[in-house]
Image (cartoon, rainbow, N blue to C red):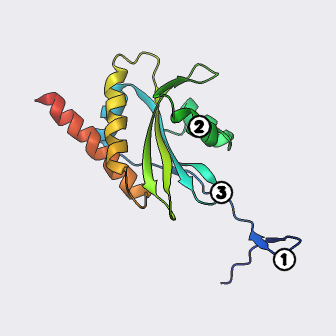
Amino acid sequence: MRKIKKVIMMEDNLTIPLVKAPEPTKIYLGKEARMKLHRMGAKGMAVILFDEFWGPVFQYYYIKRSKLVSRLLENRAMPAELSIIGKYVREMVLKDGTRVLIAPFITRGQGRDNMNFILVELRENVKNKKRLLELLTEVASELNGSEKIDLMKISNVIRKKLIKKKNNAAK
């Protein structure tokens, strides 16, 4: 089946295809990792990846009903705003009072390095946000330098780090 793309014709006959922005995809963690993340105080998780065409794009999420994920789904400009802020801080409070931890990581793009971010929304009663920030930092460190981030890679890295944290805490 042939796909027909809509194009914009510019004055100098340059054509630009009209393509939709990538849609966010749910991260699958498995029961053990989900429970650990919940006990650590996470209410939701999001990953913002830099797209060569679109710029910062909300690409992956965990728990769609969290305030952070809901706002990212509603506001397509929010990933760009969070990307700017995320270069300078590791914790922020959004306008609605939602507390968020953010950690950057670099991927290799087409001839340049791209800044990406992993974010976690904190529950109101989180006792030790330091553990969650350590988790984000470990995940970001593992993803640093990757050429491609896909659903399997992000899910496996987060799951591995969560299960490792559980085993280290038990020792």
Asked if residue 19 can be seen in this view, the reply is yes
Q: CA distance from mark 3 to mark 1?
A: 24 Å
Q: Quadrant of residue 145?
A: bottom left
Camera-nearest residue between 10 and 22: 10
Are there few (<14), some (14-19), or many (20+) residues within 10 Å of tag 1? few
126 left or right, relative to 25: left
Reading the image, the residue beneath label 1 is 13
In primary-sequence order, the first of circles 2 and 3 is 3
Say what amino acid the circle numbered 1 marks.
Answer: Asn
Asked if residue 61 can be seen in this view, the reply is no
Q: CA distance from mark 2 to mark 3?
A: 19 Å
Direction bottom: furthest residue: 1
Give the quadrant of the C terminus.
top left
Say what amino acid the circle numbered 3 marks.
Answer: Ala
Direction left: furthest residue: 171
Give the quadrant of the N terminus.
bottom right
Q: Which mark is residue 84?
A: 2
Marks counted in the figure total 3
